[in-house]
Amino acid sequence: MKRARGGALLVASSVLWLPAQSLAAVVRVPADAQSIHAGVAAAQAGDTVLIAPGTYYEHDIELKDGITVLGEGRNEPAVTIDAVGLGRIMNAHNPTVKPMHAHIEGITFRNGFASTGGGIAASGSDFGFELEIVSCAFVANIAQRGGGLYVQAGNGSLIDCRFDGNTAVHGGGLACADACMTNVKAVSALRCEFVGNAATMAGGAVDVGMHSLHMTDCILEDNQAQMGGAVHSSNYNSAGCRLQGCVFARNIATEGGAFHSMEDVLFIANCLFTENRAKVGGAAWISYPRDAVIRSCTFARNAAPKASGICFSEVPLLSLEQSILADGADGNAIACIWNGELLELTCCDVYGNEGGDWVGCIADQLGVSGNISLDPRFCLGQNPSSPYSLQAGSPCAEGNDGECGQIGALGVGCEDTSIVQTSISAIKVLY
C-alpha cells in the first residue's frame, strides 16, 4: 500500500489538529485502501486517513491513537459511513497508560447500533483521551447510552456537528460518563445542533454524568425524554454544567421540558428557552444545585401544569439575574418544591404567565432588586428570524431601565409597534 508523504499533506490543510506533521502520511480511501477499516488499520500516529466522497457500508472501525480521519468535501459532509444497524460504526478505546489523541472531521455516521455509542464510543483509562470531532453528523443511530456518541473517562470536543434522529435510553444524541468518578473530564460543544433525538429515560439530546459539560451557541430543538427533553445533567462530584448562547425550542419531557439537572454546579447565560413542554418545569427542572447562576436568559411560551418556566427543588443557593420569564402556559412562572428560601432574583421580568407571575416562592421579590412585571414586548412577527428579540421601547431593552441594563437573552431587534403603526397611518394620510 502506498503511503503518500510530503506534499500530500496539503490536501488535509483544514485539519485543526495534526501531530508530528513532518512525519505524517496520507492514506487515501479507496485509492490506497479499499475500505475505511483498512485505511485506519494502515495508518500510524500522525497520519491522516483521507476518505473520498461517497457512502461506505462499514462498522466496528477501531480508531487509533494520533491519527486524523478526514472526509473530503466541505459544508455538509460528503462522506457517509452507514452501519445499516449491524454494529457500532467507530470505536475509540484507550487501554494504555498514556493519553490518546484523535481527530475526526467531515463524516456522517448513520444507522449505527450498539449498547453504548451507536455512532462512536470513546472510552479511556485513567489517563483518558482527547477526541476532537469537527463538522460531523450523527444520524439515526441507536444505543442504550449515547445513541450518536458515547464518551467515558475522556475529553471530547465537538465543533459544528449535528445530531439528528438518534435514540437511546440515556442521551439520545450524546451521553457522557466517568465510571471511576475521579479525574473528572470535560465535553464541549460549539455551534452544534441537536434535532429530533429521543431518550426513553434521560437527556433526549444529551445526558451527562460525572463529566463537565460546556455548550456554546448550540441549537437543541424537538428532542424528547422523560427527564430533560434536551439536556440532563447529574454531576454529583461538582463537575459542572455551563450553557451559553444556546437555543432550546420545542423539547418535551415529563420533568424539565428542555433541561433537567441534579446536584450540579450550573452556569446558564444568554440562552433562549421557548415552546418547551413538560408536566413539571416546562423549560427546566433544577434539583439540589450545589451552586447555580442563571443570567441574561429568556424563557418564553413554555408550558407545564406546575412551573411553566422553571421548577426548583431543594435550592441551597441559586441566583436568577437579568432574565425574562413570560407568556408561560398552564402553570405559574416559577415553582419551588421544598427549600426555596435562598432563590434570589435580580433584575428579572416575570410577566403574562397563566398560573401567575410573582407568586409562591418568589412572591416577595417583585419591586425589589430591579424586578418587574411588565410586557417585555417581543418583536415576534416583526422579526421572524429573531422573534424573541425586543422592541426598541421594551422595558427590558438596555437604556430603558438604567438600574439593570438589558434583561433577557436578546437585545433590540425591531422598532416599537406604536412607531410602526404611526408610520403606516401617516402614509395612508398622503393618499
Image (spheres, grey):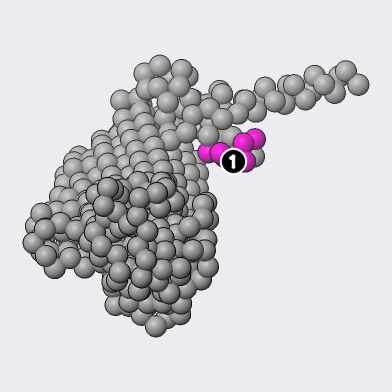
Q: Is residue 119 left or right of residue 178?
A: right
Residue 409 lies in what quarter of the image?
top left
- 97 shown above or below 159: below
Q: Quadrant of the N terminus?
A: bottom left
The location of residue 415, given as percent across then percent down, is 62, 25
Q: Is residue 1 left or right of residue 97?
A: right
Magenta stretch, main secondary structure class = loop
Front residue (pair 367, 33):
33
Task: Tell me which amino acid carries mark 1.
Answer: Ser
Q: Quadrant of the C terminus?
A: top right
The location of residue 372, given as percent across then percent down, is 41, 29
* Residue 198 drawn in magenta: no
Which residue in the structure is indicated by mark 1? Answer: 385
Name the residue at 75% across, 21% down: 423
Name the residue at 29% across, 54% down: 24
First to last magenta residue range: 382-388
